[in-house]
Amino acid sequence: MREALRGAPTPPRRLVLDAEGMSHVDAAGLDALSGLIAELEEEGVEVCVARAKAPLSARLDVTPITADRRFATVRAAVSASRGSSPSPAPTPHP
Protein backbone atom coordinates (compact mmCIF):
# COMPACT_ATOMS: atom_id res chain seq x y z
CA MET A 1 0.00 0.00 0.00
CA ARG A 2 2.77 2.41 0.89
CA GLU A 3 4.37 1.98 -2.55
CA ALA A 4 1.08 2.69 -4.30
CA LEU A 5 0.58 5.82 -2.21
CA ARG A 6 4.12 7.03 -2.92
CA GLY A 7 3.52 6.57 -6.64
CA ALA A 8 0.31 8.61 -6.69
CA PRO A 9 0.51 11.71 -8.91
CA THR A 10 -1.01 13.86 -6.14
CA PRO A 11 -1.05 13.34 -2.37
CA PRO A 12 -3.90 10.90 -1.67
CA ARG A 13 -6.67 11.78 0.77
CA ARG A 14 -8.33 8.36 0.86
CA LEU A 15 -7.26 4.77 0.35
CA VAL A 16 -9.92 2.21 -0.55
CA LEU A 17 -8.96 -1.34 0.35
CA ASP A 18 -10.87 -3.78 -1.86
CA ALA A 19 -11.27 -6.71 0.51
CA GLU A 20 -13.29 -9.02 -1.73
CA GLY A 21 -10.46 -11.56 -1.92
CA MET A 22 -9.78 -11.52 1.82
CA SER A 23 -11.59 -14.35 3.55
CA HIS A 24 -9.78 -14.18 6.89
CA VAL A 25 -7.37 -11.97 8.80
CA ASP A 26 -5.69 -13.30 11.94
CA ALA A 27 -4.81 -11.28 15.05
CA ALA A 28 -1.34 -10.42 13.76
CA GLY A 29 -2.81 -9.21 10.48
CA LEU A 30 -5.36 -7.07 12.31
CA ASP A 31 -2.59 -5.54 14.42
CA ALA A 32 -0.55 -4.76 11.32
CA LEU A 33 -3.59 -3.32 9.54
CA SER A 34 -4.51 -1.19 12.57
CA GLY A 35 -0.96 0.14 12.78
CA LEU A 36 -0.88 0.99 9.08
CA ILE A 37 -4.25 2.73 9.31
CA ALA A 38 -3.07 4.80 12.27
CA GLU A 39 0.08 5.85 10.40
CA LEU A 40 -1.84 6.76 7.25
CA GLU A 41 -4.41 8.76 9.18
CA GLU A 42 -1.61 10.71 10.87
CA GLU A 43 -0.51 11.59 7.34
CA GLY A 44 -4.05 12.71 6.44
CA VAL A 45 -5.08 9.61 4.47
CA GLU A 46 -8.48 8.13 5.36
CA VAL A 47 -8.72 4.35 4.92
CA CYS A 48 -11.97 2.68 3.85
CA VAL A 49 -12.82 -0.93 3.10
CA ALA A 50 -14.99 -2.13 0.23
CA ARG A 51 -16.55 -5.54 -0.44
CA ALA A 52 -15.60 -7.16 2.87
CA LYS A 53 -17.45 -10.39 3.48
CA ALA A 54 -19.31 -10.84 6.80
CA PRO A 55 -16.58 -12.75 8.72
CA LEU A 56 -13.92 -10.19 7.79
CA SER A 57 -16.22 -7.26 8.46
CA ALA A 58 -16.86 -8.57 11.97
CA ARG A 59 -13.10 -8.80 12.59
CA LEU A 60 -12.67 -5.21 11.44
CA ASP A 61 -14.65 -4.06 14.47
CA VAL A 62 -11.38 -3.99 16.44
CA THR A 63 -9.71 -1.66 13.91
CA PRO A 64 -10.19 2.06 13.28
CA ILE A 65 -12.33 1.11 10.24
CA THR A 66 -15.74 2.03 11.64
CA ALA A 67 -18.99 0.96 9.96
CA ASP A 68 -19.31 4.33 8.22
CA ARG A 69 -16.04 3.58 6.41
CA ARG A 70 -17.10 0.18 5.07
CA PHE A 71 -18.81 0.03 1.71
CA ALA A 72 -20.59 -2.63 -0.31
CA THR A 73 -18.77 -1.64 -3.49
CA VAL A 74 -15.55 0.08 -4.50
CA ARG A 75 -17.65 2.53 -6.50
CA ALA A 76 -19.56 3.54 -3.35
CA ALA A 77 -16.30 4.10 -1.44
CA VAL A 78 -14.86 6.21 -4.25
CA SER A 79 -18.11 8.18 -4.59
CA ALA A 80 -18.06 8.91 -0.86
CA SER A 81 -14.55 10.30 -1.18
CA ARG A 82 -15.74 12.63 -3.93
CA GLY A 83 -18.50 13.99 -1.72
CA SER A 84 -21.44 12.05 -3.14
CA SER A 85 -21.82 10.33 0.26
CA PRO A 86 -23.60 7.09 -0.62
CA SER A 87 -24.67 5.05 2.35
CA PRO A 88 -22.12 2.61 3.74
CA ALA A 89 -22.69 -1.10 3.28
CA PRO A 90 -25.82 -2.10 5.18
CA THR A 91 -24.75 -5.75 5.37
CA PRO A 92 -21.40 -7.30 4.40
CA HIS A 93 -21.34 -9.90 1.65
CA PRO A 94 -22.00 -13.44 2.92
Image (spheres, rainbow, N blue to C red):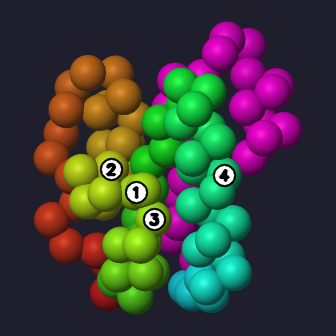
The CA span between labels 4 and 2 is: 16 Å
- Which residue is at a point 51% across and 70% down the rendered structure image? 20
User: Which of the two discs, 3 and 2, sits closer to the camera?
Assistant: 3
| Disc with the residue nearer the chain's start (4 vs 3) | 4
Side of 54 where 35 appears, left or right: right
- Which residue is at a point 43% across and 81% down the rendered structure image? 59
Residue 50 appears in view: no
Q: Which residue is mark 1?
A: 65
Cβ atoms under marks 3 and 2 closer than 8 Å: no
Q: Which residues are magenta?
A: 1-22
Q: Provide residue 1's location: percent of width, then percent of height.
A: 74, 46
Give the structural element (helix, strand or loop) at label 2: helix
Give the structural element (helix, strand or loop) at label 3: loop
State which quadrant residue 10 falls in: top right
State which quadrant residue 3 falls in: top right
Residue 63 - label: 3
- Please state which amino acid type lies under the numbered disc 3: Thr
Q: Provide residue 53's location: percent of width, then percent of height.
A: 40, 79
- Please state which amino acid type lies under the numbered disc 1: Ile
Give the structural element (helix, strand or loop) at label 4: helix
Q: Provide residue 25's location: percent of width, then percent of height.
A: 60, 82
Instruction: Give the total number of marks visible in the rendering.
Output: 4
